[in-house]
Image: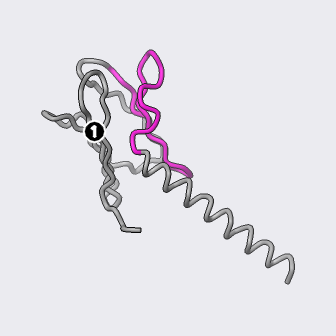
């Protein structure tokens, strides 16, 4: 498995192609279109809900990273994109399962010994 510093994914939102990226070293989360940077910020707090405009439509970007990664785009009609960075979500679920298994093995060994 290769370490990937910048995780990227593309989406079509409001008839516009949008590029979403997350830099794991600087914790910078960016949403760009072909012409402009729509949103760029450091993700330091575990919960973020900024309002952004894409093609003159207002969306709420919801980022949650405390235990599991979750980044979604919501407008007044509901959830537009369920997960902006699917690979990041998948890795966080895998890491949580790994820690749960290792912890249960440690507890089991501690009870037997």
**x, y percentage for residue 111?**
85, 76
Which residue sits furthest right? 112
* Left/right of residue 72 with respect to residue 11 in the rendered view: right
Residue 74 in magenta stretch: yes
Q: Residue at x 43, y 51 (%)?
A: 88
Question: Residue shown at 31%/61% (left/top)?
Answer: 5
Which one is in front, 12 or 95? 12
Report the quarter where the C terminus lies. bottom right
Looking at the image, residue 14 lies above or below residue 111: above
What residue appears at the point 53 percent right and 50 percent down from the top-left corner? 66
**Which contiguous range is marked in magenta?**
58-85
Q: Residue furthest top?
A: 77
Q: Is residue 59 shown in magenta?
A: yes
Residue 35, image x, y percentages: 13, 33
Look at mark 1 in the image and give the residue it sits on.
Answer: 31
Residue 95 image offset from top left, x and y in percent:
55, 61
In the displayed image of the protein, which residue is found farthest to the front? 1
Q: In percent of the image, x 33 and y 20: which residue is there?
A: 58
Q: Is residue 43 above or below residue 80?
A: below
Image location of residue 9, percent across then percent down:
32, 44
């Amino acid at each position: 498995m290769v370490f990937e510093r910048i995780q990227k994914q593309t989406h079509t939102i409001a008839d516009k192609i949008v590029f979403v990226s997350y830099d794991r070293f600087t914790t910078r989360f960016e949403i760009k279109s072909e012409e402009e940077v729509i949103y760029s910020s450091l993700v330091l707090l575990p919960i973020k809900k900024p309002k952004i405009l894409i093609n003159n439509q207002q969306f709420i970007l919801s980022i949650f990273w405390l235990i599991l990664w979750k980044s979604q785009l919501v407008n007044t009609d509901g959830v537009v994109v369920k997960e902006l960075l699917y690979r990041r979500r998948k890795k966080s679920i895998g890491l949580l399962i790994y820690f749960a298994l290792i912890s249960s093995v440690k507890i089991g060994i501690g009870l037997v010994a």
